[in-house]
Image (cartoon, grey):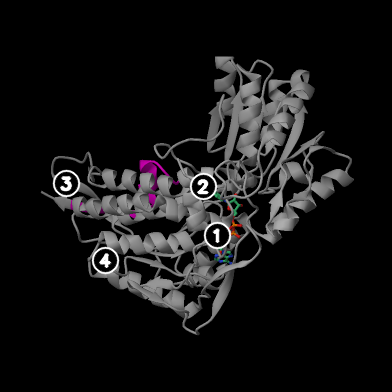
Amino acid sequence: MLSKAQLQDLSGAPVPPALHLIDGEARAASDGTAMDVISPLDGAVLTTMARGTPNDAKAAISAARRAFDDGRWAGLAPAARKKVLLKWADLIEANAVELAVLGVRNNGTEISMALKAEPMSAAGTIRYFAEAIDKVYGEIAPTAPGTLGLIHKEPVGVVGAIVPWNFPLMIGAWKLGPALAAGCSVVLKPAETASLTLLRIAELALEAGLPPGVLNVVTGEGAVVGAAIAESMDVDVLVFTGSGGTGRRLLEASARSNFKRVYLELGGKSPNVVFSDAPDLDEAAKVSAHGTFRNSGQVCVAGSRLLVERSIHDAFVEKLKVHAEAMKVGDPLDPETSAGAINSERQLAQNLRFVAEARAAGRQIVTGGERILQETGGFFMAPTIVAGVQPGDAVAQHEVFGPVLAVIPFDTEEEAVRIANDTEFGLAAAVWTADLSRAHRMVRAIRAGVVHVNTYGGADVTVPLGGVKQSGNGHDKSLHAFDKFFDLKTAWIKL
Ligand code: NAD
């Protein structure tokens, strides 16, 4: 358990200017420019970081290419890579509190969640893929007796990884774990508002024995650094988590350049469907509120569309309101806080616009709806429940990516399925019912990468996470995540 004193010590520590990590060295931007890192806790400048240029991206890609081609990492036995990665995971865990506090100061997630969901989750993910890599086999094809068909799994080469700000270490590790275990070299581009902890764990990777050049981190603007990685002729695979708009640009860049494979993990507007026969409606209300409002709703799988059977609608909304209002919003470095800051002022303004639009359309703001704690200088918003929402409303169709829950009533299972599937997204969903057959029918009927039953969130690294429809085209987590980082090569041999 974290003590307040321990947190206070770390939370005031000065943060040195952040530089890229290229070819095992800390490097300033090639033109010497840096950008301010604003803390969402108080709106003040936390530090600066290198504002990457296209040349910085090129230097990192060249370093990754050299590292891959000379076999300093890809050429090691899988068991040797495993050893380094396990040591890296240990170092991340040993530095977990420092990493969590730095991350919170950078991106605003409440510390109670950040500690588990960031360094500890990243360490667990890296360990999972490290442990798996010397248990992944090639195949022998079922050919006729006169031939031997061998299917080799070879690392794809240089991987570009572009990640968002909401859970930088967790999502970063979902890419880095399997890519590095497979033997690839990586150029990582963190989000503008959440780069510091990824830089730090990349330093720890060197300390663990990862050869220089195998993992490079270039900070700066997406439209500059991210775009240069996406356009590169020397990046073999691009893995991305972020918004649909950026995902579209990455696919276009791939088509314009070298047809690099592009795997996208995008947004969601996940339906959370509560039937009147849910085993425990109190539990359903509590988990639904927390599933939407933790990390101030900045969670890709957040159950931000709540579908409630009409017969229990009013009573259920009342329960939700109680849980939402009981959540402690504020200082993300206070271990008792249940929802921290909004990541940026821009994101906060966007959240408030969705609420204003719903209000103008006559929807009921059951609780919240406004910016709070403005006197701190930080970016905070009250958990917000909007009831009486129509399925076609903006607040029901667009990913707000903030603490805003849209509640829609339904009468029948068929109607629930229809509304649940009525968005462009298909990332996550949940169904609350004690009827086993109905639960399985709903799991089949809802188009989503994951459907929870009588719970929300918490699916661990053993299962894949990926979207359908416009939520994405690949999978993070589980052994399936390796598929992105291996090329299949056939050896066809006449005996
Ligand atoms: P974003 O698309 O704005 O940015 C993501 C990353 O892409 C950042 O590193 C950014 O610098 C970079 N980028 C921006 N423009 C770019 C460009 N033109 N070329 C190359 N790179 C560019 O997304 P965000 O606001 O950081 O993240 C929030 C989004 O991420 C939400 O939509 C959320 O649902 C999604 N998300 C999805 C998952 C998932 O697993 N499916 C998980 C977390 C977040």
Kindly report which numbered mark, 1 or 2, lies closer to the viewer in this rendering: 2
Q: Compare marks 3 and 1 and give the one earlier in the sequence.
A: 1
- Mark 3 vs mark 4: give the one in front: 4
- Residue 482 colored in magenta in the image: yes
Instruction: Give the spatial CA distance, label 3 vs label 2.
Output: 64 Å
Do callouts 3 and 4 mark residues in contact (Cβ within 8 Å)? no
**Label at residue 106:** 1
Q: Secondary structure at mark 2?
A: helix
- What amino acid is found at the position of numbered circle 2 in the picture? Lys
Picture mark count: 4
Q: Quadrant of residue 313?
A: top right
Q: Read off the residue under disc 3.
A: 148
Find residue 150 and name its label: none
For label 2, the crowd category at 10 Å Cα-Cα, with few meaning under 14, some 14 to 19 and many 20 or more, is: few
Picture coordinates of residue 198, whole percent (x, y): 44, 60
Question: Amino acid under label 4?
Answer: Pro
Residue under numbered circle 2: 4
Q: Is residue 85 left or right of residue 243?
A: left
First along the sequence among labels 2 and 4: 2
Q: Residue 75, percent across and down? A: 20, 61
